[in-house]
């Protein structure tokens, strides 16, 4: 048994937390429980929160570990896809090495679970998937990994990709993805037909990238909601980015939010820079689940990012003009409880019986954590210490 003493909970209580067999066994007022039978870690009043969950990352794309690559801009999504393919052919760097480097960077920042998209296209086939499946196995004691089979080059315009997506699910991917059915494939019905037929037949969830703007993008969101209901996938579908929700009038937004809520289609946001952003508070008020992800980290799409989900919570708060403590707590929730729920994970809470995925930080509140983004003094995965003071523990 391990006992974390003198921890501060989000509600301000000072407690001692006992952990046994990967779960929280007891929570007692600080100083009242015996430490004789346990290894003790004194948190010295640090805030203890659930492990962070990155709901959208691209482990296969990162260029971490390679010399810094100048960004190759493109004016459209299609052009940026082409630039990435050029860079990928030039570098020929093993996905497994780069993905592992990124995991070793984000775990000390408190990430204990993630959903990674992996490119499935005619160039790479299932190679990226196979690499991430190996990484998932070797990193299983550090982080839980879900994998989305992601058709980065489109489906209808890329012969063979539909079959590759189906094969990817058969070989271990957890969800089937999609990408801009109108903007990339120019065939909304065909694109969504492939994605949802695979998901329904294979019994898996869906996570679709959607960058298409304005009323077009909102119409696509409603089409996704309709397909979700028809396929019996309520609660198992997410749309990533959904910029259109931040770029339409109230009527269009309301119709779309209602459709998403009825089908329980979740929306992922990373607090994007120059793009319109889904209005987090309005979506939640309408009954739509919202969660957060880091998206691209030091790759062909962006030279920026470090995978810190507290930083991501701050960026979302900044973009949404969140200032009150309750607003900052909401931004934090997108990186913990809300993200875990969308990913179908056990609840991320600090309570007896919960999985002991935990993070300690030297701050007094959740709001302060989002504002200050302090070092993570302790990270635990299923009750095992995996990082201290920003340094990974016991990496093989």
Image (cartoon, grey):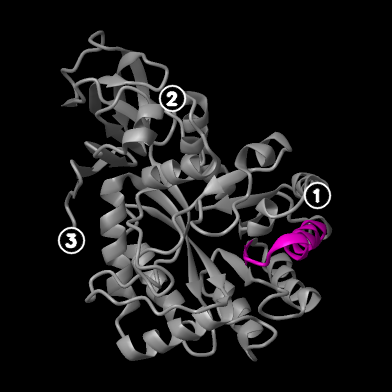
Q: Residue at x 44, y 32 (%)?
A: 354
Residue tagged 1: 259
Residue 276's spot in the image, x, y percent? 60, 55
Q: Residue at x 63, y 49 (%)?
A: 278
Question: Which quarter of the figure is the N terminus placed in?
Answer: top left
Give the spatial CA distance, label 3 vs label 1: 47 Å
In this rendering, the answer to whether 288 lies above or below 364 is below
Give the spatial CA distance, label 2 vs label 1: 34 Å
Q: Earlier in the sequence, mark 2 or mark 3?
A: 2
Residue tagged 2: 351
User: Would you call the spot at circle 3 few (<14 residues within 10 Å), some (14-19), or many (20 or more)?
Assistant: few
In the picture, measured across the screen, residue 92 lies left or right of residue 235, that is left
Question: Which one is in front, 106 or 245?
Answer: 245
Give the spatial CA distance, label 2 vs label 3: 31 Å
Q: Is residue 170 magenta?
A: no
Please identify, in this view, whether the residue under mark 3 or under mark 1 is nearer the observer.
1
**3 and 1 marks in contact (CB < 8 Å):** no
In this rendering, the answer to whether 159 lies above or below 141 is below
Question: Which quarter of the figure is the C terminus placed in?
Answer: bottom left
Please identify, in this view, whether the residue under mark 2 or under mark 1 is nearer the observer.
1
Element on which disc 2 rests? loop
Point out the stretch of residues depicted in magenta. 207-226
């Amino acid at each position: 048994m391990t006992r974390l003493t003198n921890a501060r909970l989000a509600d301000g209580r000072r407690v001692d937390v006992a952990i046994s067999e990967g779960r929280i066994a007891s929570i007692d007022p600080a100083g009242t429980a015996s430490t004789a039978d346990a290894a003790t870690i004194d948190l010295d009043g640090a805030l203890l929160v659930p492990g962070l969950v990155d709901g959208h990352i691209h482990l296969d794309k990162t260029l971490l570990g390679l010399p810094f690559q100048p960004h190759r801009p493109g004016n459209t999504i299609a052009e940026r896809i082409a630039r990435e393919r050029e860079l990928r052919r030039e570098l020929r760097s093993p996905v497994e090495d780069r993905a592992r480097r990124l995991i070793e960077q984000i775990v000390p920042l408190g990430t204990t679970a993630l959903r990674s998209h992996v490119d499935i296209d005619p160039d790479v086939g299932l190679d990226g998937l196979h690499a991430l499946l190996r990484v998932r196995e070797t990193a299983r004691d550090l982080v839980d990994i879900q994998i989305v089979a992601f058709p980065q080059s489109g489906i209808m315009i890329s012969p063979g990709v539909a079959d590759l997506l189906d094969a990817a699910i058969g070989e271990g991917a957890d969800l089937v993805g999609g990408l801009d059915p109108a903007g990339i494939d120019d065939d909304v019905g065909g694109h969504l037909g492939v994605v949802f037929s695979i998901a329904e037949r294979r019994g898996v969830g869906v996570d679709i990238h959607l960058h298409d703007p304005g009323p077009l993008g909102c119409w696509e969101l409603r089409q996704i909601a309709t397909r979700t209901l028809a396929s019996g996938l309520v609660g198992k579908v997410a749309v990533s980015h959904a910029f259109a929700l931040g770029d339409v009038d109230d009527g269009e937004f309301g119709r779309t939010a209602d459709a998403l809520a009825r089908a329980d289609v979740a929306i992922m946001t990373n607090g994007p820079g120059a793009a319109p952003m889904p209005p987090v508070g309005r979506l939640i008020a309408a009954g739509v689940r919202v969660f957060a992800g880091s998206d691209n980290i030091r790759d062909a799409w962006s030279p920026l990012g470090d995978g810190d989900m507290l930083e991501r919570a701050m960026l979302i708060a900044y973009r949404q003009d969140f200032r009150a403590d309750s607003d900052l707590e909401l931004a934090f929730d997108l990186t913990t409880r809300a993200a875990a729920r969308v990913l179908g994970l056990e609840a991320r809470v600090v309570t007896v019986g919960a999985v002991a995925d935990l993070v300690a930080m030297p701050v007094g509140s959740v709001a302060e954590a989002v504002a200050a983004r302090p070092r993570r003094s302790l990270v635990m995965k299923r009750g095992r210490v995996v990082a201290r003071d920003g340094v990974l523990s016991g990496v093989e």
